[in-house]
Amino acid sequence: MSERLKSLTGLAATARLPAFDRTALNPGILHLGPGAFFRAHVAPYTDAALALAGGDWGIEVASLRTADVADHLNEQNGLYTMLVRDTEGTVAHVMGPILKAHVATRNPSELLARLEDPAIRIVSLTVTEKAYGFDAATGGLDLQHADIAADLANRHAPRGVIGYLIEGLARRRAKGIAPFTPLSCDNLPSNGAVLKRLVLDFSGRVDPELRAWIEENVPFPSTMVDRITPASTDATYRDAEVLTGRVDLAAIETEPFTQWVIEDRFANGRPAWEKAGALMVEDVSAYEKMKLRMLNGAHSLLAYLGYIGGYEFIRDVMDDAGLAALARRHMNAAAATLGPVPGIDLEVYADELIARFANKAIAHRTYQIAMDGTQKLPQRLLEPATEALADGSKAETYAIAVAAWMRYALGIDRNGKSYELRDPRAAEIVERLADIPRNGDAVSLALFSLPGLFPAALTENLAWTEDVANKLEILIQDNKLPLF
Ligand code: CS2
C-alpha cells in the first residue's frame, strides 16, 4: 500500500502538479459544499488561474452535512487528484488551491468565524438544488423547508445554507466589515438572482435593516457551470493511486470539457478565472437557459428512460440508437425555446453534448442523475415545456421526459425490483401513489397534483396531460415499446 497524498514531493511522474507556490496562498474563498463537482470545477479553475496569473486566492471549504470529504482533504493538506478521462486515456492533475476544510455540523462556530473573517471575500456554493429552500411555485423562500424553518426560528445558530450566509453577513455588517460575494454554482436558472431573492426574503423577515444593507452592498453574480462529473468509485481511487503513487481518498474523476460563465460583479475582487478559460459576462441568463434546457433536460430524459430501461450509465443509453436520437431531438426542441446565445452555435453545442454523453471513458450513472427529480424538473423540463406550448408547439419531447420521470417515480424497475427514490419529496410521492392503480391516467393524475411542482399552464393543457398519460401507460406496460 502506498503512502497517503500529503505533499507534492516524490509523486509519480505521471501526475501533473500545481504550477504555483502553495505556501504563498491565503484564504480568500470559502466554498460551501466540497462535493465532487466543486473539486472538478471551481477548484481547478482557481488552480489554473493561480498558475497563469499568480495571486494568493486560496480556498477553504466547508461541508454543511457529512464529514468524509472534509476529513480526507484535511488529512491530505488540501491536496487531491482530479482524473480527466477520455477514450485516449486518463490524466491525473493534483490540485493545490485548497488550504483547509471545515465541517459545519461538527463545529458551527468555526464556520461562522470563517464567514466573518475579512480575508474571505467570496463565498461560493455547490450545495445542490434542494439545499436552497426555493419554492418553485412562488419563486420565494419555501417556509416548509426544514433548514429554512429551523434557521428562521433560530437565526444565530444556523444549519442551512441561507441561514449561514445571513448570519455571516449580519456579523460582518455589525463589525463594519465589507461583505463577501456569494457565488452560486448550482444548476438553477439565474442562480445568483435566486440566491439573492432568498437571502433578501429571509433577512427581511428577521432584520429589515440587514436586508436593506444586503440589497445595497452585496452583489450576487449568477454563473453557468458545466462539467460532467460522475460520483467517485473504487476505480477513481485506484487510478489516482496508480498515476500519483499515493493513496488519495479525495480523488475525483471528470471529463475533459469544462465551461464557466460568470457575471463579473464582485464586491471585493476575484481570482483571474478568465485566464483559466472562464467567460466573464454582464448577463449569464442566455447561457444558463441553454445549458439547463439542452444539457440537463436531455440528461434527465436519458436518465429516467435509461434507468427504467435497464441501462446503468449514460454512455450505455447512448448506445441505443433510438434513445440517442430522442436525446438529439430533445436538444433541438429545447434550442427552439432559446434566444440567441452570444458566441454559441446551438447546432454545434448539441453535437458536442451528444459526443460528451457518449464518452466511453465516463461512467455516469443514470441513477445519479435521476436523483432529486422534483428539484430538477422545473428548470430543465417544465419551464421550456410551458414556453413551447405557449408558442404553439406540441411539446411532445417534454411529455416523454415527464412520463419517464413518472414511471421512475413508481420505484420499481422492469424486473420488479424496487429502488429508493432519492428525492426530498420521496415520502410525499410514495404516499400519493400508494393506492393508485398502475395505469397512465391514474399515476399521472396523482403526480400532476403534487403541490407546487407542475405549473397550471401545463396541467390545464388537456392535450398535453393526455399525451403524458398515454406515454406513461406505454412505459408502464413495456419500456421497450416505441413511444410514438
Ligand atoms: C446532471 C448534472 O446529475 C445531474 O442532474 O444532469 O450533474 C450534469 O452532469 C452537470 O450539470 C454537467 O455540467
Image (cartoon, rainbow, N blue to C red):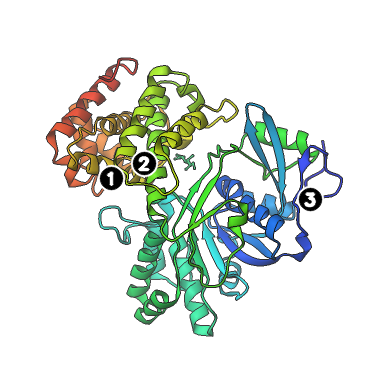
Quadrant placement of the N terminus? top right
In this view, the residue in front, 169 or 409, is 169
Q: Please name the amino acid that badge 3 sits on.
A: Lys
Q: Please name the amino acid that badge 2 sits on.
A: Arg
Question: Given this view, does label 2 or label 3 mark the residue nearer the observer?
Answer: 2
Q: Secondary structure at mark 1?
A: helix
Q: Return the residue at label 3.
A: 6
Q: Position of residue 251 (x, y in %)?
A: 67, 42
| Distance (Cα) linking label 1 and label 3 | 46 Å
Q: Residue at x 53, y 84 (%)?
A: 175
**Residue 300 in which image quadrant:** top left
Q: Residue at x 42, y 75 (%)?
A: 214
369 vs 106, left or right, is left
Number of residues whose C-alpha sits closer than 10 Å to that of mark 2, classed few (under 14), some (14–19) or many (20 or more): many
**Residue 363 in which image quadrant:** top right
Query: Who comes first in sequence, dot 1 or dot 3?
Result: 3
Q: Are marks 2 and 1 in contact (CB under 8 Å)?
A: yes
Number of residues whose C-alpha sits closer than 10 Å to that of mark 3, classed few (under 14), some (14–19) or many (20 or more): some
Disc assigned to residue 315: none
Q: Return the residue at label 1.
A: 383
In this view, the residue in front, 167 or 338, is 338
89 vs 269, left or right, is right
| Distance (Cα) linking label 2 and label 3 | 41 Å
In this view, the residue in front, 414 or 42, is 42
Q: Please name the amino acid that badge 1 sits on.
A: Glu
Question: Given this view, does label 1 or label 3 mark the residue nearer the observer?
Answer: 1
Is residue 416 in view? no
Disc assigned to residue 293: 2
Q: Is residue 476 above or below residue 158?
A: above
